Image (cartoon, grey):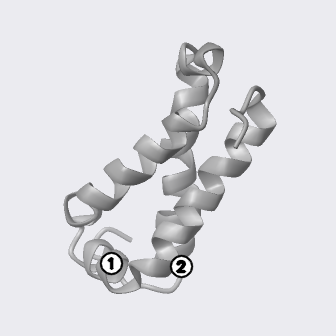
Amino acid sequence: MPLIVNEVEAKRLARAIASDLALYNQEKVKQGIENDSFYEVMKDELSEGKELFLSRLSPELKQNKLIIQLYERAVADVIIKLSGQRIKSKIW
């Protein structure tokens, strides 16, 4: 696969990875949100997802901190925000 060279494609990849993490780890996501331990419960999966994201970026994009933050933003928007709308939590 060719490396991603622009922000739009990087954002799309980040959101796709986050969607896959949510889909394949539904119980862990639920447990993490309910107990306010999402990042702890999903630590390995989130790390693996970030490694995949970074492996697909061009060297130039990897140097841009804002591009790197796209992955964390996608996790918050796609997994936490969307799941939080249907999973009860102590913090919202």
Type of amino acid at the residue the image marks with label 2: Gln
| Measured Cα–Cα span from mark 2 to mark 1 | 10 Å
**What kind of element bears circle 1?**
loop
Q: Quadrant of residue 30?
A: bottom left
The mark found on residue 67 in the picture is none
- Which percent across, then down, holds residue 19? 58, 68
Q: Is residue 16 left or right of residue 50?
A: right
Residue at (77% x, 40% y) in the render: 9
Question: How crowded is the residue under tag 1: few (<14 C-alpha within 10 Å), some, or many (20+)?
Answer: some
Q: Is residue 45 left or right of residue 74?
A: left
Type of amino acid at the residue the image marks with label 1: Ser
- Which percent across, then down, holds residue 79? 50, 66
Q: Quadrant of residue 57?
A: top right
Q: Which residue is mark 1?
A: 89
Report the number of discs. 2
Residue 69 higher or lower than 83, as above or below: above
Q: Which residue is mark 2?
A: 85
Q: Are marks 2 and 1 in contact (CB under 8 Å)?
A: no
The C terminus lies in quadrant: bottom left
**What kind of element bears circle 2?**
loop
Residue at (80% x, 38% y) in the render: 8
Q: Is residue 57 left or right of residue 29?
A: right
- Which percent across, then down, holds residue 4? 71, 33
